[in-house]
Amino acid sequence: MKAIPLHLNLLTLFLFSALFYGCSTLDPVKERKEQTQVFSAQLQEAQARLLTAPLTLENCLRIALTNNYTIRLADLDTHLAKLNKNVAFSAFLPQVAASYGYNTFDMIPSSKNMDFQMAVATVTMPVFAPATWFLYGATCDGYASAELAANYTRQNIILQTTVQYYQLRLQLDMIQALESQLVAAQALTNRIEGLAAEGFVATWERNQARLLAEARAAELSHAKRQAGLLRATFLQTMGLSPLAPLQLDPQLTPIQKHDEPLEDMVLTALMNHPELSLADRLIVARENQVRQAFAKFVPTLAVFGELRWVDLSSFAATLPELASSSSMWMAGFSAAWTVFNGFAHYNNLQVAKTERTKSQREREATFLSVIVRVLTADGAFHDIVENRRVAEQAYQVAREKFTAYDAKTKEGLLPQSEALDALAAMDTAHIQYIQTTYLERMALSSLELAMGITKLPGQSELTK
């Protein structure tokens, strides 16, 4: 067999390395332009596919659960944890290694090229390796925790989407109310302007009417700008372009209130809240860490087998006694045991036990925190329910008062300023009533999250 020159081997190795391992270069302007074009096209495609009709809250939740980047990143973390678990499981499988060597040299004084070949195949299988078992258990715990964390992320995104949906709906309803109020204020101002021209009202009453109309116009402009910002933020939460057009379905689904006793709500939260599930999983992981630290005191055993094959046929002319091909098979077991590292192992064991105790205390703190959050959310929900009832009654009274005052001012029984004040009070009461109507829905969503029962679209509740 003819030997391959050394310089050709080196050249081949260099070309292979340059082709597959060379550094890539970056053109920032070109890269930014291409990324902008690609991502803009993706946003346009999603817009054309998802924003074809007015959206209900359930539609928005489905879009957010699919496109929200926080959820997508949490799913990637879950996938990475699953891959790490699979990698850890590979430690239980046989490890097979194979090598092949070809050597050539010159025999002196004959100056004849001699070569020989050697192949080695090795199989190793762990038999008793407690540390490996517990390492695999830790990756399983990590995968389960990642799934729980992704589930809790979905619940938070559902709450965030729900709150932003109602905030936008509230703003749009306020715009409609302000538009109606502006029309009413302008009509009243025109009437007072006519009376002022005939000298029936004072100048300051005319100015008060103008001020009311200008104030409503300014509030309407501010509300429209705020609605644009809320719309952009809401689209971002759903993973869509903040510049995309968005229409919401005007119908609101009835809300389902929780009438069960407070103690039952707290018990539901303690049974279902994802944070407590995560705390339980963390304690299991800490317990496995204690066992893993204890396993450092135990030896590890493995079996192995090795097959060697050597070809020395090229030695036939010079060293006939070596010119042959031979193979050799070896098998056995190996044991590894640290003779003395007890000081480090002992302290690692104590660290693991302390971490386990710490995780138990953290779970107890979370236990109490969940109870307080349920109490807080339940109190806030009942407060806003009462405020909505009062706001509804206040708006009804203010509307009846303005109707009566407006009729009397037309008859000349009351000054125009009384009607203007009544109109301003009615407008304020109307806005407060609209706000409390949506705040009640937001407070209910916060209560469900505190209880750990935030629902997926079309499902009874999230998987615990």
Image: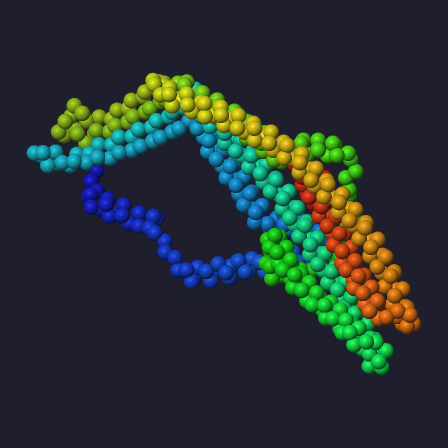
Residue at image location 71% in from the left, 31% down from the top: 267
| Residue 303 place in picture, x, y as percent | 38, 20
The C terminus - image quarter: top right
| Residue 361 place in picture, x, y as percent | 56, 28
| Residue 420 place in picture, x, y as percent | 81, 67
* Snapshot colouring: rainbow
Residue at image location 81% in from the left, 65% down from the top: 421
**Quadrant in the rendering for residue 209:** bottom right
Relative to residue 94, is residue 65 depicted above or below?
Answer: below
Residue at image location 63% in from the left, 50% down from the top: 64
| Residue 236 place in picture, x, y as percent | 60, 55
Name the side, left or right, on which 19 lies relative to 39. Answer: left
Relative to residue 225, is residue 81 depicted above or below?
Answer: above
Name the side, left or right, on which 165 lies relative to 106. Answer: right
**Quadrant in the rendering for residue 235:** bottom right
Q: Looking at this view, is 416 or 372 the one in front?
A: 416
The N terminus - image quarter: top left
**Quadrant in the rendering for residue 257:** top right
User: What count of labels does the image hold?
Assistant: 0
Relative to residue 112, is residue 23 depicted above or below?
Answer: below
Residue at image location 46% in from the left, 31% down from the top: 88
The extreme bottom residue here reads 198
Relative to residue 197, is residue 39 depicted above or below?
Answer: above
